[in-house]
Image (spheres, rainbow, N blue to C red):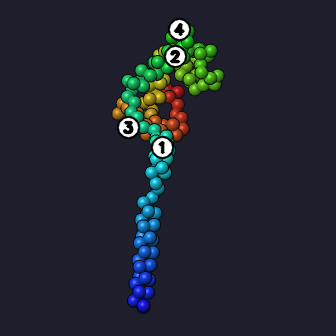
Amino acid sequence: MQVKTITGRVKTITGTTAMLAVATTLAACGPGPDEKRKAADAKAAAFTPPSVTSRLDFGSSMTRRFRTLDRNADDEIDRTELPRRNTRLLELDRNGDGKISSIEFSEGMLARFDRMDLNHDGTVTSEERAAAESAPAKPAQGE
């Protein structure tokens, strides 16, 4: 009779140990598929892909921006065409006539690109752009 009791206790201990091992293994596996998917979706939603913009591409996009702002197509942006009343674009008006010519706009925007191009390789990476945005504004050369 004692033999049966010992065997029963051994089976109980073995069964309990096995259940603890399974529970520990499952707990160590980490989050389930739903939690993993939710975490991946949240990470993807916040992802900003790295970018590289060449000086030529930047210049082309700034030309398109100028044409968009110049609503009356007179090759000048006057105060009525500015996106906001107190805008930094007024700093591009080098001759002080209250209008920004296409040349003033282009030269000012390319100077901005050159300030962002920290390693002077003719391209601005997303890291350089972020560094330029977090740095205090520097006046354009010649001011």
Real-space Cα separation, disc 3 to disc 1, in angstroms: 34 Å
The answer to whether marks 3 and 1 mark residues whose Cβ atoms lie closer than 8 Å is no
Real-space Cα separation, disc 1 to disc 2, in angstroms: 36 Å
The answer to whether marks 1 and 2 mark residues whose Cβ atoms lie closer than 8 Å is no
Instruction: Relative to 103, say whether 8 is above or below.
Output: below
Q: Residue at x 47, y 24 (%)?
A: 109
Name the residue at the left extreme: 121
Sequence-first tag of 3 and 1: 1
Sequence-first tag of 4 and 3: 4
Amino acid bearing label 2: Thr
Tell me if mark 2 has few (under 14), some (14-19) or many (20+) residues whose alpha carbon lies within 10 angstroms of its own. few
User: Label 3: which residue?
Assistant: 119
> What secondary structure is found at the residue carrying circle 4?
loop
Q: Residue at x 38, y 37 (%)?
A: 119
**Disc marking residue 131:** none
Which of labels 1 and 2 is toward the front? 1
User: Label 2: which residue?
Assistant: 68
Real-space Cα separation, disc 4 to disc 1, in angstroms: 47 Å
Tell me if mark 1 has few (under 14), some (14-19) or many (20+) residues whose alpha carbon lies within 10 angstroms of its own. few
Sequence-first tag of 4 and 1: 1
User: Label 4: which residue?
Assistant: 74
User: Label 1: which residue?
Assistant: 41
Real-space Cα separation, disc 2 to disc 4, in angstroms: 12 Å
Quadrant in which the N terminus appears: bottom left
Asked whether residue 55 appears in the rendered view, the answer is: yes
Q: Position of residue 49 (x, y in %)?
A: 42, 37
- Residue 40 lies left or right of residue 97; in this view the side is left
Q: Position of residue 39 (x, y in %)?
A: 48, 48
Tell me if mark 4 has few (under 14), some (14-19) or many (20+) residues whose alpha carbon lies within 10 angstroms of its own. few
Real-space Cα separation, disc 3 to disc 2, in angstroms: 31 Å
Sequence-first tag of 1 and 2: 1
Q: Position of residue 57 (x, y in %)?
A: 39, 24
